Amino acid sequence: MKTRDDALALLHEYTASESLRKHAYAVEAAMREYARKFGEDEELWGIVGLIHDFDYEKHPTSEEHPMAGAAILEERGYPEHVRRAVLSHADHSGVTRESRMEKTLYACDELCGFITAVALVRPSRRIADVKVKSVKKKMKDKAFARAVNREDIVRGAEELGVPLDEHIATCIAAMQGVSDALGL
């Protein structure tokens, strides 16, 4: 199995954007938190979170992402279950989410991006000041972070079998644990 250092090197090789890297760190943290909660392999889940969008900057279209990334992961020796999880986080890939890891990645991806947006509009710009209530309030504002699909956030929590408030709280707490890396 590849290490976090391998995954981090891959992310940095393909992703120059600091905001995309920070998104990867946020999703990694959320995946690790859920792995701990579910008694799963924290290192594996963290790696999947870290690399889920590594190809996005070079392959941003739905025709390419994450399929191009999965091909690169195969070339680099990443196992099938990692590639499948990466593919399953995008509905347009046609890969259904079956494992708990796949469902968790899908559930955390959009939400972590949304939580970041909420933190950035706080006066302090700190994740420590983000509350579940403020995330839910911003979800109702369709003009706020309009590129984030709220239905995906809700569906992700449902597929995971976790109440939405608990899911938001888990992701916030995970992101607070890596706030320095996120610049929040």
Image (cartoon, grey):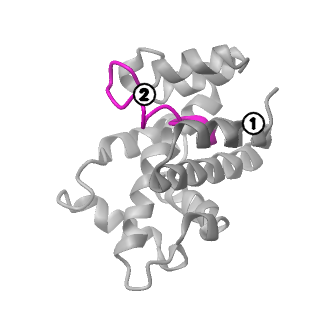
- 38 or 86, which lies in front? 86
In the image, residue 106 sits, relative to residue 163, either above or below, namely above
Q: Is residue 72 left or right of residue 123?
A: right
Mark 2 and mark 1: span between their CA atoms?
Answer: 23 Å
Is residue 50 in the magenta section?
yes
Q: Is residue 124 visible?
A: yes
What residue type is disc 1 on?
Asp
The furthest residue to the left: 143
**Residue 178 occupies quadrant:** bottom right
User: Which residue is depicted at the point 38% across and 68% down?
Assistant: 118
Residue 130 placed where, x, y %? 47, 74
Q: Main secondary structure of the magenta part?
A: loop
For label 1, the SS is helix
Residue 68 placed where, x, y %? 48, 19
User: Which residue is depicted at the point 39% across and 65% down?
Assistant: 135
For label 2, the SS is loop
- Determine which residue is flagged by label 2: 90
- Mark 2 or 1: the one toward you: 1
- 26 or 99, which lies in front? 26
Residue 126 placed where, x, y %? 50, 77
Q: Residues within 10 Å of mark 1 (few under 14, many from 20)?
A: few
In the image, residue 137 sits, relative to residue 25, either above or below, namely below
Magenta residues (range): 49-65
Q: Residues within 10 Å of mark 2 (few under 14, many from 20)?
A: many
User: Which residue is depicted at the point 54% across and 36% down?
Assistant: 14
Image marks 2 and 1: residues in contact by CB distance under 8 Å? no
Q: Which mark is residue 6?
A: 1
What residue type is disc 2 on?
Ala
User: Which residue is depicted at the point 60% across and 69% down?
Assistant: 179
The quarter of the picture where the N terminus appears is top right
Q: Which sits earlier in the primary sequence, circle 2 or circle 1? A: 1
